[in-house]
Image (cartoon, coloured by chain):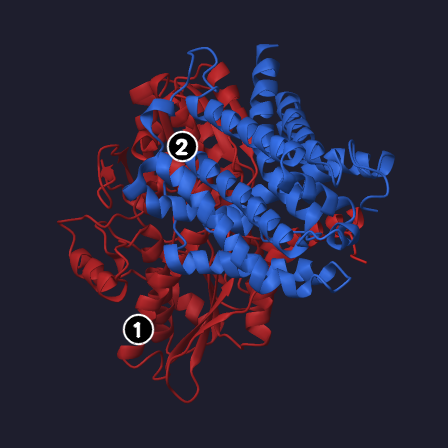
Amino acid sequence: MQAKVSRRRLVQAGAALAASTLSSPPILTYAQGETPIKIGMHDPLTGTYAAEGESEVRGANMALAEINAKGGMLGRKVQLVVEDDAANAGLASQKATKMIDQDKVSMLMGSVSSATALAVNQVAHGRGVVYMVTGGHTDPVTGSQCHWTTFRICTTTYMLAAGLAGTLYKKFGGKWYFITPDYAFGHTLQESYAKLLKDLGGTVLGNSLSPLGTTDFSSYLIKAEQSKPDVLINLTDGQDLVNCMKQAAQFGLMKKFPIGGGLSELEVLRALPKEARQGWWTLEWWWDQPNTPHVKEWVAAYQKIHTDGTWPSARTWFGYAGLHSLGLGVAKAKSLEPVKVARALEGLELPDEIKLQPNKVYFRPGDHQLMSSEFPGEDLPDGTYPNLFKVADIVAGDKIALSVKDTGCHLDYKA
Amino acid sequence: MQLLLFNAFNGLIQGVFYALMALGLALILSLNSVINMAHGGFLVIGAYLAYTLSPYLGFWGALIVGPLLAGVIGLAVERGLIRPIYKRSDPLYSLLLTFGLALIIEDLTRTIWGAQGLPLEVPDVINSPVSETYFFITGYRLFVIGITAAAAIGLYLLLRYTLLGIRIRAGTSDLETTAALGVNIYKLRALNFGFGCLFAGLAGVLAAGVLGLTPPMGNSLIMPSFVAIIIGGVGSLFGAVLGGLLIGLAAGIVTTYYPAASEAVIYLMMLIVLAVRPRGLLGEEGLFE
């Protein structure tokens, strides 16, 4: 007699599917040497931010190869331990703890999702391990929840908003509707935008919160359309941003009002069909900087390793600059002692061949935030990959960042 | 009021899509007794194959060939992996097998096509709204509704009036007797599994037109269709369609008043159905319990 499938089994199966993202083995990148220095990296290799996560890991591996080619850190080879956090905060803190306890990593780095950056921020501080946040933008990481152990490469959500708000207001007007991803990154970015907009004299018509990983944005777009905004501010990122823009284009909304946003990325631009590739956004690094030294060479070096036709993105640079910063900190401290490395990183200025952008780029001592530039500009609907974005300006980070006092950060080395 | 109307309408359109996926899932569940956790995987296979083929065949050609290939791969998977474990009485085996398969397909997709999202270009003819006021009714969405209706009606006619369909239904209600009457149930089940995968592939291509392609796209799209089957009633194909439409409509209405709950509401509905009428709205008592 054949066994039939019970309803109960079906419900259990669904639950198992939902839980399935919680386990996957680590990927080890080995380097030679007797007792290598291990650095643990957590990044989303699956889910809505998988493309961004992969870019960060690629960048870190480029830095790894360069560091090891020059003899490693303190004469020891460096080894990168990469764990998938699936952009899930609980999973990220689990994996960070595992990398500290089992893999015995000396330092941590990584993150695309702000939620994972905040989670690992707590773990790293609790264990006294230096943590280099590569790509989680939410303000509190170097603000109200800052710790002496944590440093950050990517800019803050406030800086993202401040780099673009004025331009959007001047070009399109002051009635804005927001679509905001419903977690730390979206919340702080939207608050920053709302505050900047109020100071400029505009009004917030409404704000739709979309859960991370939303595929269908039609209901949010309907609400936005009904509010008749001067501009729709789309703060989603990753695959969510791709889905939202595609659906907005299919609804013909770009003909009704302009769309702008917080953050865009080369990974996103590549996935967008041309009718959805529109509006004003901020990037944090761009491959085409003809007047900046070392950029062309770096792009060529990337493409020598990765022959899949891709170009390095801001995320690639985050991973690259992140690992190199740790290397520079260790070299300056001449030690792996976390307090000494942290002290060495404070005020550290990135050299030209690592910063790959104009303006002075340094870790601000008061909050450990890297003062890197914003690249606001416009999508190019008629461009072909990788010419998908026109950079309008390169804004120095320390010109738009909140003062250390206003970030709410108090570094306490004793705790 | 207009907002409610828009959202309800919009939810129904979304529900049509859930229904299409739930149909394939329900088909495999009934005759093959397999909870096909890899259904999302076949959805991804259909979508990516269509993407690869579209430069050569155009969107329309790829829309036909992509799902067909997914169906053929489904046939191969059934022959090689599913058939040997039919005789195991515990459905847990096939569940675990297809679950593993889902993970393998996702990683293979990532290896072959990359983790970065890819766009599937939709012909301009159907890629714009049909009216200025009802801007959310795009040509493409009407097209999806049309395809789903055609697929559902086609499946109904097949099951109702053809010899193959009658055998599938006979096999679903009593496999042993059907086999004893001389029907080759292995062939029947293989075909049925292939059909289910074809439906998954079709849903994949249609989804890719709105969402683009990513390796994990199957997982996020497949969860609501599980819910649709449970609400509609395990064992009933019409129930699967009804379940899909209902959860779409509910999500649409809730989103007007309390958007944050629009995802939770479908699981709440499932909870209520399981508590009040465990067999689902149209499920037959005893058939699957």
**Which chain appears red?**
A
Q: Nearer the viewer, mark 2 or mark 1?
A: 2
Q: Which residue is mark 2?
A: A246
Decide which of B7, B108 is in the foreground and name it: B108
Residue under label 1: A65
SS for dot 2? helix
Q: Which of these two is toward me, B4 or A105?
A: B4
Residue drawn at (67%, 26%) of the image: B250
Query: Quick one: which chain is blue?
Result: B
Q: Is residue B95 left or right of residue B286?
A: left
Kind of residue indicated by mark 2:
Lys
Q: CA distance from mark 2 to mark 1?
A: 38 Å
Q: Nearer the viewer, residue A50 or B243?
A: B243
Q: Is residue B108 left or right of residue A289?
A: right
Residue A411 vertical placement versus B214 (above, below): below
Q: Dot 1 falls on which chain?
A: A
Name the element at disc 1: helix
Query: Residue A191 location, x and y as percent?
Result: 50, 33
